[in-house]
Amino acid sequence: MKRTGSCLRSWGLLLTGLVVTVMAKDFWQKKPFTQWNESEVLMLLSNSPWAKTQTVSGDYGSAFVPRFIGSQPGGGVGAPDLRTTQGRGGENSTPLYIRWQSSTRVRQAIARLNLLRKVASEELALRFVGQPMPDLVISISGPVMEPFEKRSFQDLKPVTFLLSRTDKDKRVELKDYLSPGQTQDGSALYVFPRLLNDAPRIDLADDEVVFNSEIGKVKIRAVFKLARMMVDGKLDL
């Protein structure tokens, strides 16, 4: 797990208070990521087949200023740490952004956003996009992450899993957890095994995969439609 943990510590993304305009459907299929504009990137990272937004109770004040994490010790490729101006989800509520962080599309969006904002070179961005991801990784970020900081892998393992929509007995158990204090951008990263006996733990036959977790009394749930998460004829997880 040391290798995966080191890889994940070098990248992540915190987006809060996104105001997303309605864009043409599936722009990510119509043009290469090098042509995506900023609104499209933010949409993919907050409301797309790879990302969901869940509003939870709590009013947590303001967020942070964007910064970029460059190359890390050991040659790892750093990831953009983008924290936008917070938009509150309404009185006594706040958004959580649940993102399939190990997917190619998400990494393309992260790289493109840093290119657009001129905080990364093209070489670094392409290295980041092409970085191998041996495990499945779900990222959670939001305006406040203290509740996630107080949780450990042992706390979350009993209540955190990926669930097949078509086979209720098929659960992918949590393999590792990186709290916000362990990541350079302050996001929480949930790691799941990609393979079992060299076969994918999740495939199209599952139809949808559900991410479930809990932080205290808050139940976190995001449903991902697998048929929409395809890139070049393959599941992009």
Image (cartoon, helix red, strand yellow):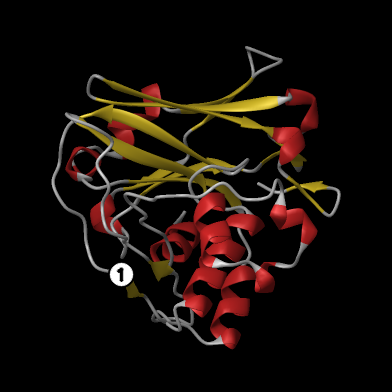
Given residues 12 and 8, the one toward you in this image is 12
At 52% across and 79% down in the image, what residue appears? 115
Up-down relation of residue 166 to residue 152 (above or below): above
Given residues 32 and 76, the one toward you in this image is 32
At 80% across and 25% down in the image, what residue appears? 205
Up-down relation of residue 54 to residue 164 (above or below): below
150 left or right of 49 in image? left
The residue most toward the top is 168
- Crowding at label 1, few (<14), some or many (≥20) Cα neighbours within 10 Å? some
At numbered mark 1, what does the secondary structure look like: helix, strand or loop? loop
Up-down relation of residue 227 to residue 231 (above or below): above
- Residue 18, position as x, y percentages in the image: 38, 51
Given residues 89 and 142, the one toward you in this image is 89
Quadrant of residue 219 within the rendered picture: top left
Residue 101 visible somewhere in the drawing: no
Q: Which residue is mark 1?
A: 66
The residue most toward the right is 233
At 71% across and 55% down in the image, what residue appears? 27
At 32% across and 51% down in the image, what residue appears? 16
Residue 113 visible somewhere in the drawing: yes
Question: The residue under label 1 is which amino acid type?
Answer: Pro
Given residues 160 and 127, the one toward you in this image is 127
- Residue 125, position as x, y percentages in the image: 56, 78
- Residue 198, position as x, y percentages in the image: 76, 43
